[in-house]
Amino acid sequence: LMKPYKHPHHQTMNGAVNRYFKYRSFDSLQSNFALELEPLLTPRSLYMPWPTSTVRAFAEFFYTGQVNSKWLLAPVALDLLVMAKIYEIPLLYKLILEVLYSILAKKEESLSLICTSLMETFRTKTLNSYKGDEEKTNTYLTSNDNYQELLKLKVSLENIDNGYYDPDLLRKQSRAQSSSTQESSGSANGEKTATGAGSLETSSTNVPTVFAGGPR
């Protein structure tokens, strides 16, 4: 019996057709799998755009109802403060605020002790150099810029401790931020600009916004 004649390219064409339909079926299977994917299997980063340490601390709070002293200040505690505000969790927000207030109180107390110690050392050294002359010592300390800065800092700390608003600290911080912003923009253009005391009102809009918008 004679075997039917087969074209030499017939087998190659059949293989290509089979591969084509095989790939098409695989693509359709992938699309069906993507459509049937459960939300619980979706990566967590698509739902909560926060570091892993922050998410773990967030879950730990729901399990214990307390804040952990081992949490880092940044990014965990600060991120949790923003998360509590966004996701409307007042208990977590109040607890994080209490922690931040306690940290600020300790820093304020430490800064006050350091400032007092520096002022006493400054006055003792100056008094010894003038051989106990109080009048010359007071005259020198009044004209000394470093001692006057320490004195202003001590007054500001006392005002804050008494619950008063201190505009000098806010004015210095605003001036420092505006000047650094203008210097960075000037260096990008090949020039630097310095900000004076009179440009505080015009440069207050250059202060960067913290957490502008936040995560969505």
Image (spheres, rainbow, N blue to C red):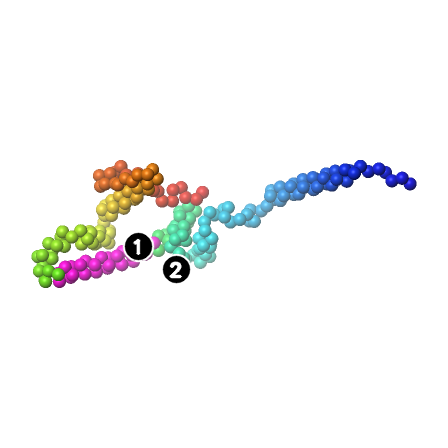
Vertical placement of residue 190 versus 74, above or below = above
Residue at the spot 39% in from the left edge and 59% down from the top edge: 69
Residue at the spot 26% in from the left edge and 37% down from the top edge: 202
Quadrant containing the C terminus in the rendered view: top left
Residue at the spot 69% in from the left edge and 39% down from the top edge: 20
Is residue 66 located in the magenta-colored stretch of the structure?
no
Left or right, 17 with reference to 55: right
Residues marked 2 and 1 touching at CB (< 8 Å)? no
Left or right, 195 with reference to 4: left
Left or right, 17 with reference to 187: right
Q: Is residue 139 visible?
A: yes
Is residue 111 located in the magenta-colored stretch of the structure?
yes
Instruction: Kindly identify the amino acid type of the residue bearing the numbered disc 2.
Output: Ser
Q: Which residues are magenta?
A: 100-128
**Residue 44 coordinates in the image, percent (x, y):** 51, 49
Give the residue pinned by disc 1.
Answer: 104
Q: CA distance from mark 2 to mark 1?
A: 16 Å
Instruction: Kindly identify the amino acid type of the residue bearing the numbered disc 1.
Output: Leu
Q: Is residue 207 visible?
A: no
Q: Is residue 141 or residue 91 the one in the foreground?
A: 141
Which element type, helix, strand or loop, lies under badge 1? helix
Q: Quadrant of residue 115?
A: bottom left
Q: Quadrant of residue 183?
A: top left
Q: Seen from this angle, which residue lies furthest right?
A: 1
**Residue 58 coordinates in the image, percent (x, y):** 44, 53
Quadrant containing the N terminus in the rendered view: top right
**Residue 172 coordinates in the image, percent (x, y):** 25, 46
Give the residue pinned by disc 2.
Answer: 69
Vertical placement of residue 195 versus 69, above or below = above
Q: Is residue 8 or residue 1 the one in the foreground?
A: 8
